[in-house]
Amino acid sequence: MITGIIVALPEELATLTSQKVARGSYLKLNNELLVAHSGAGDINANNAAQLLVEKGATRLVSWGCAGALSELLKPGDLVLVDKLRDADGSLVDDFYVSSSLPEVIKNYLPKNTSVYTGTLLESLDIVSLSAIKKQLHVSTGAIAVDMESIAIAKVAKQHRLSFLAFRVIVDPASMDLPQAINQSLNAQGIIETPKLLSFIARHPFEIPGLIILGRNFNAAKRTLKALATRLDYVMAYDSDKT
């Protein structure tokens, strides 16, 4: 089985390989593993997933970060997705996840990292406010939110391929994201440093929140890197159990 992994951001890509991959392109890591750098959002994710299918992928994986909707989840925690809901809250699909897989994976993750199985909600934009995160959790039952996984899952379903999503929490449900993030992101979900510095200069009170977010992001990357070191085993385990 050839696994095709889609990542939205360069920082997420770096947890899998030190090689650079241009946005919209892919890299063959070995005979059984392809990775594509999509850029943020559903359209980019769809295009990257279709590319990997064309290159021979027989399983698609959504890999990267997410925001928490449930207050149980903390930065660095891993979500194994078993249901997907679209931006309207409608159930798109559900997937089999072996009940023993979370414990298997936890053995390879940093200490005190939790692994959750649950519903991932699609968002068309970044969900910044804590109040909205909590409201979405109540109304949809989703425990986390991202912008790409549903698009990837739809491509997998279209081509009758298996699908997995590994998403690690960056911002907890209790956290309002600093306004500087939305103000400095471009259309590909990449922070433009000049815009960020300009916004911070005019809003210095944002600095503490950005420092906390940076720490959270580092925690998420540590989890992804740890999982990546045993990804071959996890993929083989999943194939055996499904």
Image: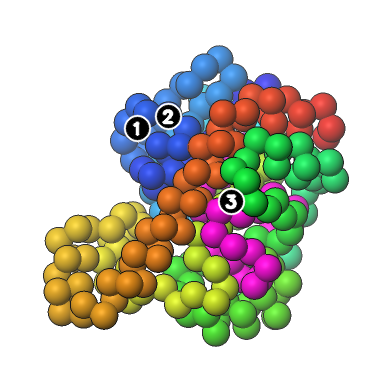
Q: Which of marks 1 and 3 is nearer the N terminus?
A: 1
Image position of 161 with respect to 96: above or below:
above
User: Where is residue 21, by image quadrant?
Assistant: top left
Which residue is disc 1 drawn over?
21
Q: Which amino acid is tagged 2?
A: Thr
User: Where is residue 61, by image quadrant?
Assistant: top right
Point 62% across, 46% down: residue: 111
Q: Is residue 166 left or right of residue 175?
A: right
How crowded is the residue under tag 1: few (<14 C-alpha within 10 Å), some, or many (20+)? some
How crowded is the residue under tag 2: few (<14 C-alpha within 10 Å), some, or many (20+)? some
Image position of 129 with respect to 100: above or below:
below
Q: Are marks 3 and 2 in contact (CB under 8 Å)?
A: no
Where is residue 14 drawn, in percent x and y? 40, 37
Q: How far apart are marks 1 and 2 (CA)?
A: 9 Å
Q: Which of marks 1 and 3 is in front?
A: 3
Q: Which mark is residue 167?
A: 3
Q: In this view, does 130 lie to the left or right of 215?
A: right
Q: How far apart are marks 1 and 3 (CA)?
A: 20 Å
Q: Residue 17 carries which label?
A: 2
How crowded is the residue under tag 3: few (<14 C-alpha within 10 Å), some, or many (20+)? many
Point out the stretch of residues depicted in magenta.
60-85
Residue 82 part of the magenta-drawn span: yes
Q: Earlier in the sequence, mark 3 or mark 2?
A: 2
Residue 87 seen in the current view: no
Point 40% across, 65% down: residue: 212
Residue 203 part of the magenta-drawn span: no
